[in-house]
Image (tube, coloured by chain):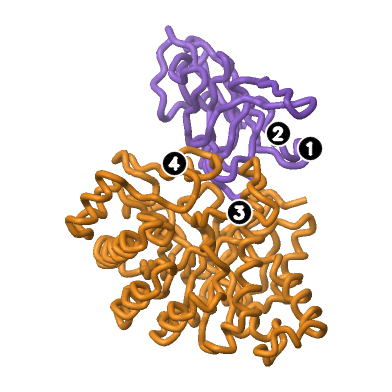
């Protein structure tokens, strides 16, 4: 398992996503309210690029007429058929136990630590003053 | 439980580079003004001053909210030039035609809405404009795309003229009629249009949509899009029943009908029910000489999207068997939000021979392509 530098901290604004290709895999790196998460950029239903979907929340209702919006900014809606995924866990709303978008561990690493390695940083120039988003796979 | 795509290999004829025929592709204008060059001054003026007036409740909005912006478009299909999804040929090639080695794409334009127009003369002019636009803007630039002759069935004289005008032009592959009309399509008032299509060698595509002014379900207007979407099969069932029971296929035996954007799993149960009742009620409709199932088997084809996803995926194979593998044609519905990807639409492996029929051979034969 290698650690790949995919972005600098601050590069991905909260509520947005950066699509990257790491070791031949298409991955979406998301900033959810300041925390970073990584998901495979491919819907488990029909294969759409999840990164082009809508970042949204979760609507719930105890009964007709009662609606609540929770998990704002934490749900990802597929750009095609609207399947929804929890960005933090990859779980699908429709079948949380069995249908998931694969997740990858993300850590924030200071540039100084990156200088010691081993990290792969083909596309992101690294300086010691900055912090970086690192995906493991 | 459906199998996640990440766990299995794509299932499509394109794997063996056969190319497939997509029976439902939607081209759009970059702006409504793109149709102006194909309209006379009279209709340009009316369009600018009054605009189109469909029979539906709203002039410039769909009856129901759609899943995503642009009246339900794939969110990743908006071109960088700022145009509407489906308006940029380069992007259509990248996302569909080249991506999947499409041999032919059957265009189903949903613009102009001439077939829904209350002013039928204006409607006929809009249909003609949409036809010229398809032929000149799309087919001439991309010969893999085939046009559909738009007509307004509420003005049969103009519709027949338009069909005859396009006959022999290989850019046009079929006639397209909005299936939600003022009356069920099998009624005699529509026969001249149906006859003209058959006489000129055109199949008829009945692509879901259109606003007749009638509620979209037999039970009245739904509240939610989640209710509206499953009304597509209801609309198709009404069409098939009307065409069969009115005796259209007895009158026009060589008429070929493609049902587009209604899925297909509902067809066997409707067919069984029609046959069952025919045994009891045939005296009411003595003009029918054969079982309803026989007319359906001979005259009706279905396209796949929006494909059913049964709990046990393999049940879909039995459904195809009941309909007849030679009557099913693949369609994506690009660039709409509920489109199907040819690699993953079937959640069960389709045997190689049948796959080739659904993805290519049936449509090639139906449209006389190749």
The quarter of the displayed image where residue B353 is located: bottom right
Shown colour of chain B = orange
Depth check: give the residue in front, B231 or A133: B231
Q: Which residue is mark 4?
A: B70
Residue at mark 2: chain: A
Q: Give the farthest residue toward the top.
A: A129
Instruction: Say the numbered circle drawn on residue A97.
Output: 1
Q: Residue at x 78, y 74 (%)?
A: B273
In space, the residues marked 2 and 4 are separated at their CA atoms by 28 Å
In space, the residues marked 3 and 1 are separated at their CA atoms by 36 Å
Q: Do residues under tags 3 and 1 come within 8 Å of each other at their CB atoms?
A: no
Residue B170 x %, y %? 32, 78
Q: Which residue is mark 3?
A: B216
How crowded pointer 3 is (Cα within 10 Å; few <14, some 14-19, many 20+) is rated as many
Shown colour of chain A = purple
Q: Residue at x 68, y 58 (%)?
A: B308
User: Which label lies toward us, 2 or 4?
Assistant: 4
Depth check: give the residue in front, A59 or B199: B199
| Element on which disc 4 rests | helix
Q: Which residue is mark 2?
A: A91
């Amino acid at each position: 398992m290698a650690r790949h530098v995919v972005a600098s901290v601050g590069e991905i604004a909260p509520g947005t996503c950066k699509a990257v290709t790491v070791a031949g895999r298409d991955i979406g790196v998301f900033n959810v309210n300041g925390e970073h998460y990584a998901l495979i950029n491919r819907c488990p239903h029909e294969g759409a690029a999840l990164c082009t979907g809508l970042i949204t929340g979760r609507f719930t209702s105890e009964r007709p007429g009662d609606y609540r919006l929770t998990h704002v900014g934490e749900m990802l809606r597929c750009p095609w058929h609207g399947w929804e995924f929890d960005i933090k866990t990859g779980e699908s709303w429709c079948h949380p136990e069995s249908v998931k978008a694969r997740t990858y561990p993300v850590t924030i690493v200071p540039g100084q630590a990156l200088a010691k390695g081993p990290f792969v940083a083909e596309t992101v120039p690294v300086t010691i003053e900055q912090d970086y988003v690192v995906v493991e796979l | 439980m459906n199998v996640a795509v990440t766990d299995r290999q794509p299932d499509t004829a394109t794997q063996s580079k056969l190319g497939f025929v997509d029976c439902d592709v939607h081209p759009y204008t970059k702006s409504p003004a793109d149709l102006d060059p194909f309209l006379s001054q009279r209709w340009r003026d009316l369009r600018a001053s009054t605009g189109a007036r469909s029979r539906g409740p709203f002039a410039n909005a769909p009856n129901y909210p759609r899943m995503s912006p642009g009246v339900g478009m794939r969110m990743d299909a908006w071109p960088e030039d700022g145009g509407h999804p489906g308006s940029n040929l380069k992007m259509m090639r990248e996302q569909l035609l080249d991506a999947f080695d499409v041999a032919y794409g059957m265009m189903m334009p949903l613009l102009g809405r001439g077939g829904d127009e209350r002013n039928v003369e204006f409607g006929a002019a809009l249909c003609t404009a949409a036809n010229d636009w398809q032929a000149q803007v799309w087919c001439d630039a991309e010969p893999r795309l085939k046009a559909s002759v738009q007509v307004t069935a509420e003005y049969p004289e103009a519709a027949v003229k338009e069909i005859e005008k396009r006959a022999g032009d290989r850019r046009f592959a079929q006639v397209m009629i909005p299936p939600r009309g003022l009356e069920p399509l099998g009624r005699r008032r529509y026969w001249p249009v149906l006859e003209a299509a058959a006489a000129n060698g055109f199949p008829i595509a009945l692509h879901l949509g259109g606003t007749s002014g009638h509620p979209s379900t037999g039970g009245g207007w739904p509240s939610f899009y989640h209710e509206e979407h499953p009304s597509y099969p209801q609309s198709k069932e009404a069409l098939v029943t009307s065409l069969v029971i009115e005796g259209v296929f007895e009158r026009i035996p060589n008429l070929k009908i493609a049902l587009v954007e209604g899925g297909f799993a509902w067809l066997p149960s409707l067919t069984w029910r029609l046959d069952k009742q025919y045994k009891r009620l045939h005296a009411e409709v003595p003009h029918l000489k054969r079982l309803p199932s026989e007319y359906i088997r001979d005259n009706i084809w279905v396209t796949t999207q929006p494909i059913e996803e049964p709990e046990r995926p393999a049940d879909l194979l039995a459904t195809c068997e009941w309909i007849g593998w030679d009557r099913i044609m693949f369609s994506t519905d690009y660039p709409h939000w509920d489109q199907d990807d040819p690699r993953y639409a079937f959640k069960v492996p389709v045997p190689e021979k049948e796959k080739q029929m659904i993805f290519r051979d049936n449509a090639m034969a139906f449209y006389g392509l190749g």
